[in-house]
Image: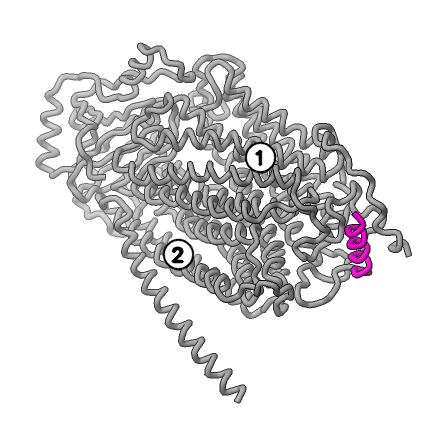
């Protein structure tokens, strides 16, 4: 039995400089993605501070209006294409191979190329701040005709650089998606059928399938936009017979599913973490797993709800309202499953658990405002107002970013070999939850009162809620400090982590912390039961006790 | 002994749960009533329908959110592991009956909301511009308009970067302040000279994107006298935020008098905050980023004002 030699003596820890080069190790690439993403998160966050600084008073007095428009455009673009997608791809890189027992991704060099495109288009996007005329100012939707106006008439301008960066981001994401889907489909450990796969992998598979289906529409739409902007074509130009609303179809055919690309893996994170910290199996595992793909199917047929007021016929409004509302059903199945998991558990309120609970509460709130937005007559009133901005930020910051923080704290020991500090983590969680709600809740009354989004000035009756929102935003800005402190100091000199500090069940927790480069190597254990067997006493894999004993011996020797 | 204790606990649990659900129902009802106060004054016949729907969904949403918060609150209070308890909880893997229930109930609920919303939206007659319907609007077919209250005159709305111009072709009047008679169905023809704009009057709860290259017919009926804001709702470039106009709803007599007086006025530059700020910006030579220059202010009979206090 080869098990007797597992795990081998660990080689000396590799140098940290591998994070600066073209590594093909998914665990290195994962950390490269996450660190790069958080670098851009700080830039995007700084831009958010300027936005909220401008909006703390009714007049446009902090920056010029054109500058404001550039800043809010770049805030959205950076946060989506340079923070949230890369950070999730980082988690995919770390978690997918280790969770399914694969030595690496299916196409390691493609993986390297996909990652290194991120700094390339990131630099391109940041460079657009410094070209004559400034960056793109048409919002992250970049609707024509305003996006193709090109006031200075230069060939190289903020908008063209923006389009190129978004197209490159799309190419990077497609390369990533091909890799993740192939890895999940082809490289699972022996015995790991689909219904023994952790839910995070289910949601990653669902999300990455959406990328493959949706991204070509956006990329095609963006290429046509670039042609209109730079080469005088008339795909969207009304004076040449084009249709500006056509772009909205291309854009939202991808960009609505993009929200599911973001939130599905976060559902995966919730589904992984609630069982660990409730000490109970995930309630209704099969339903939670399958609901991901129902969300994929429905998510592809709701895009028109983003432009109900732009001139679509009544039948389309009714149809897309109904499909949008239906998404509440599989999403509800997941929410109830998490509540069922918590119910009667033995809750351990660690930092990751607190982030998950906060994220769940915010997500349910966002779901309710989402159903309101799906309702055509209400949407007609609040679309393009701050109500939408509030809803969106509850989904993205309140739920997705909180889920991502939970994941970072939960898997930090596995991939760095160090424990994060609980006190700083809990402080970070508290500041994030309070800051996010102070920042984003006031946006709902503002929208209901009729304050449009994307404005650099507003009527005085909106001042009260805007001041509160700005204070919340500044608190969110402060909340990053304990996070950065925690990550840096615990990575450098935090207490050493054992292979399974949270007493969690999963293949990744049967690897040393940090795992060796090829994970299980040739000794991939055979999976013999479903994930989340908390309280059942059944082992997850063959020879589990032996594997764990050897890991403990190795830790004791170190 | 055990069974009787068990049943009395169950009875207490059922009683407690029913009480709590009752509290949640009351709270939801109250929030539904509060929802009306979060919205601007109702100044069109669309507003009560939209507000009713919003109030209904607020109540339902409060109940759902309250329910979830209750469960989360309960487990945080009563299901925490003891300090040194490293054991697992009872492994409950799922319950098919519950899954069916919590799939079916949300399904029925959202479909009911969708049906209610479709009904409201058909009553609103929010017909899309691709169905250029004049005399046969759904409102009329449902008997919403009396025969003698058909739209009498179409008002042309021209959106530009960054001003709103309103033309009354029947009276030969143009203005940058929209005047409307109360309780009278009005038809607009919305056009844009340059980019996308949004014709949005929050007090009316109505919004329609204005799309260059299309003429969009749009109907509404104001129901309350007052001064309201029209806000551009589709991002239109540098002075997007400043692209607002006032809407004055007045009695038929006042409206007729205003039209008559306006027709007698000579043409003069209309309101355009963008033109004003652009001139200042040129003088200061500030280092903003590139912008297209604003279109010259439209020549109108009555510029109106955008500095007077407005109701919403």
> Where A124 falls versus A33 (above or below)?
above
Position of residue B128 measured from the top left corner of the image (x, y, whole percent)? 37, 40
Q: Is residue B60 visible?
A: yes
> In the depicted view, which residue is nearer to us: B66 or B176?
B66
Q: Which residues are magenta?
A: A543-558
Q: Residue at x 65, y 55 (%)?
A: A502
Badge 1 sits on which subunit? A
**Quadrant position of residue A491:** top right
- Indicate the secondary structure of the residue bearing disc 1: helix
**Dominant secondary structure of the residues highlighted in magenta in the image:** helix
Position of residue B207 measured from the top left corner of the image (x, y, whole percent)? 32, 38
Q: Residue at x 17, y 25 (%)?
A: B304
**Quadrant position of residue B234:** top left
Q: Nearer the viewer, mark 1 or mark 2?
A: 1
Q: Is residue A301 visible?
A: no
Q: Is residue B97 left or right of residue B302?
A: right
Residue furthest to the bottom:
B1
Magenta residue check for A318: no
Quadrant location of the N terminus of chain A in the rendered image: bottom right
Gap between marks 1 and 2 measured at Cα: 34 Å
What's the mark number on residue A165?
A: none
> In the depicted view, which residue is nearer to us: A277 or B241?
A277
Q: Residue at x 44, y 43 (%)?
A: A436
Badge 2 sits on which subunit? B
> Where A415 falls versus A145 (above or below)?
below
**Which residue in the protein does label 2 denote?**
B61
**Which residue in the protein does label 1 denote?**
A38
> Where B240 falls versus A86 (above or below)?
above
- Indicate the secondary structure of the residue bearing disc 2: helix
């Amino acid at each position: 039995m080869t098990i007797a030699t597992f795990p081998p003596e660990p080689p000396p820890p590799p140098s940290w400089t591998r994070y600066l080069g073209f590594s093909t190790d998914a665990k290195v690439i994962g950390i490269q993605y996450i660190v790069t993403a958080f670098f851009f998160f700080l830039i995007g966050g700084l831009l958010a501070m300027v936005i909220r600084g401008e909006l703390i008073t009714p007049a446009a007095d902090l920056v010029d209006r054109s500058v404001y428009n550039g800043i809010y455009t770049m805030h959205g673009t950076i946060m989506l294409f340079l923070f949230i997608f890369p950070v999730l791809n980082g988690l995919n890189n770390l978690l997918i191979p280790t969770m399914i027992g694969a030595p690496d991704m299916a196409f390691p060099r493609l993986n390297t190329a996909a990652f290194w495109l991120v700094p390339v288009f990131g630099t391109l996007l940041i460079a657009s701040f410094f070209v004559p005329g400034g960056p793109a100012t048409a919002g992250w939707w970049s609707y024509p005709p305003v996006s193709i106006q090109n006031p200075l008439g230069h060939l190289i301008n903020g908008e063209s650089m923006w389009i190129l960066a978004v197209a490159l981001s799309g190419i990077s994401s497609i390369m990533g998606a091909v890799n993740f889907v192939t890895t999940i489909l082809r490289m699972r450990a022996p015995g790991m059928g689909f219904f023994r796969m952790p839910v995070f992998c289910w949601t990653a598979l669902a999300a990455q399938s959406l990328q493959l289906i949706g991204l070509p529409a956006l990329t095609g739409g963006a290429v046509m936009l670039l042609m209109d902007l730079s080469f005088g074509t008339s795909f969207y130009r009304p004076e040449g017979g084009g249709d500006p609303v056509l772009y909205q179809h291309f854009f939202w055919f991808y960009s609505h599913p993009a929200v599911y690309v973001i939130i599905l893996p976060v559902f995966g994170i919730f589904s992984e973490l609630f069982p660990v910290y409730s000490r109970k199996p995930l309630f209704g595992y099969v339903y939670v797993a399958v609901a991901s793909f129902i969300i994929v199917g429905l998510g592809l047929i709701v895009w028109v709800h983003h432009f109900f007021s732009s001139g679509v016929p009544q039948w389309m409004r009714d149809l897309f309202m109904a499909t949008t509302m239906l998404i509440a059903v599989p999403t509800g199945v997941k929410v109830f499953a998490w509540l069922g998991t918590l119910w009667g558990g033995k809750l351990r309120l660690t930092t990751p658990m607190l982030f998950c609970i906060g994220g769940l509460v915010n997500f349910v709130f966002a779901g309710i405002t989402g159903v309101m937005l799906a309702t055509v007559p209400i949407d007609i009133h609040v679309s393009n107002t701050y109500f939408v901005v509030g809803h969106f930020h509850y989904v993205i910051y309140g739920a997705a970013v909180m889920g991502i923080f939970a994941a970072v704290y939960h898997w930090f020991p596995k991939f760095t070999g160090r424990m994060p500090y609980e006190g700083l983590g809990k402080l970070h969680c508290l500041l994030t939850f309070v800051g996010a709600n102070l920042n984003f809740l006031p946006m709902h009354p503002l929208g209901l009162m009729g304050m449009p989004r994307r404005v650099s000035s507003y009527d005085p009756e909106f001042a009260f809620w805007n001041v509160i929102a700005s204070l919340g935003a500044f608190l969110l800005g402060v909340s990053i400090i304990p996070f950065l402190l925690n990550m840096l100091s615990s990575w450098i000199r935090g207490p050493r982590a054992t292979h399974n500090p949270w007493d969690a069940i999963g293949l990744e927790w049967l690897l040393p912390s940090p795992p060796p480069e090829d994970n299980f190597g040739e000794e991939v254990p055979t999976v013999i039961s479903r994930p989340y067997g908390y309280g059942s006493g059944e082992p997850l894999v063959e020879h589990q006790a032996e594997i764990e004993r050897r890991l403990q011996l190795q830790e004791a020797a170190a | 002994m055990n069974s009787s204790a068990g049943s009395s606990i169950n009875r207490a649990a059922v009683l407690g749960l029913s009480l709590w659900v009752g509290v949640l129902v009351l709270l939801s009802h109250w929030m539904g009533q509060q929802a009306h106060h979060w919205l601007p004054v109702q100044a069109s016949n669309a507003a009560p329908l939209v507000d009713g729907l919003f109030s209904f969904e607020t109540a339902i949403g409060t109940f759902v959110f309250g329910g979830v918060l209750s469960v989360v609150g309960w487990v945080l209070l009563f299901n925490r592991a003891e300090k040194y308890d490293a054991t697992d909880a009872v492994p409950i893997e799922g319950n098919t009956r519950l899954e069916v229930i919590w799939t079916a109930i949300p399904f029925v609920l959202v479909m009911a909301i969708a049906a209610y919303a479709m009904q409201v939206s058909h009553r609103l007659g929010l017909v899309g511009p691709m169905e250029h319907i004049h005399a046969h609007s759904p409102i009329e077919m449902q008997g919403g308009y009396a025969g003698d209250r058909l739209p009498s005159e179409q008002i042309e709305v021209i959106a530009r970067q960054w001003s709103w111009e309103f033309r009354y072709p029947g009276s030969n009047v143009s203005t940058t302040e929209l005047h409307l008679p109360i309780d009278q169905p009005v038809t607009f023809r919305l056009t844009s000279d340059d980019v996308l704009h949004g014709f949005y009057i929050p007090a009316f709860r109505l919004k329609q994107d204005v799309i260059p290259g299309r003429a969009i017919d749009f109907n509404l009926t104001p129901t309350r006298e007052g001064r309201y804001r029209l806000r551009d709702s589709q991002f239109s470039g540098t002075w997007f935020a400043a692209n607002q106009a006032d809407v004055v709803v007045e009695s038929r007599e006042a409206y007729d008098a205003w039209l008559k007086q306006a027709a007698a006025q000579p043409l003069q530059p209309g309101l355009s905050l963008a033109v004003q700020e652009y001139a200042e910006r040129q003088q200061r030579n500030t280092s903003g980023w590139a912008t297209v220059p604003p279109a010259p202010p439209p020549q109108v009979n009555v510029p109106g004002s955008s500095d007077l206090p407005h109701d919403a």
